[in-house]
């Protein structure tokens, strides 16, 4: 049996659920992050926050949340695969 560190490819259903879950993580993480930054900025400075800056912050924080969640899923899959191969 060849040694392979890569987990088997997920089924179509699992891939679709992962995509939906990671999309939700992106939207929620980006929305919360950009919303908090906007609230803090407007509380301190007192002027409205730029829509463009909001969009950039939303995308950046959303991307970080998405990549963090994706890396966590990969680690969990590897750990699950390793525990199955030990049986």
Image (cartoon, grey):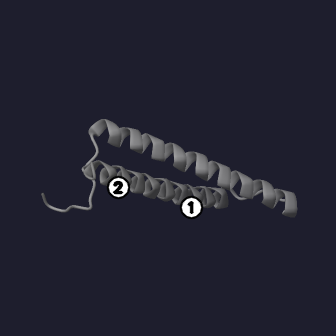
Please tell me which residue lies in front, 1 or 61.
1
Q: Residue at x 28, y 39 (%)?
A: 12
Quadrant in the picture for residue 82:
bottom left
Discs 1/2, front: 2
| Outermost residue, top side | 13
Sequence-first tag of 1 and 2: 1
Q: Quadrant of the N terminus?
A: bottom left
Please tell me which residue lies in front, 34 or 13.
13
Q: Which residue is mark 2?
A: 78
Residue 69, x across and y down, in percent? 49, 53
45 w.r.t. 69: above or below: below
| Outermost residue, front side | 87
**Callout 2: SS:** helix
| Outermost residue, left side | 1
Residue 60, x across and y down, in percent? 56, 61
Q: Residue at x 52, y 43 (%)?
A: 24
Quadrant in the picture for residue 39:
bottom right
Relative to 15, is 50 on the left or the right? right
Q: Which mark is residue 82?
A: none
């Amino acid at each position: 049996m060849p040694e392979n560190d890569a987990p088997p490819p997920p089924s179509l259903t699992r891939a679709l659920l992962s995509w939906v879950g990671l999309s939700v993580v992106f939207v929620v993480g980006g929305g919360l992050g950009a919303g908090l930054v906007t609230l803090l900025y407007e509380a301190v400075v007192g002027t409205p926050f730029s829509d463009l800056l909001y969009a950039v912050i939303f995308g950046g924080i959303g991307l970080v949340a998405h990549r963090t969640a994706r890396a966590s899923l990969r680690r969990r899959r590897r750990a699950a695969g390793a525990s199955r191969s030990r049986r």
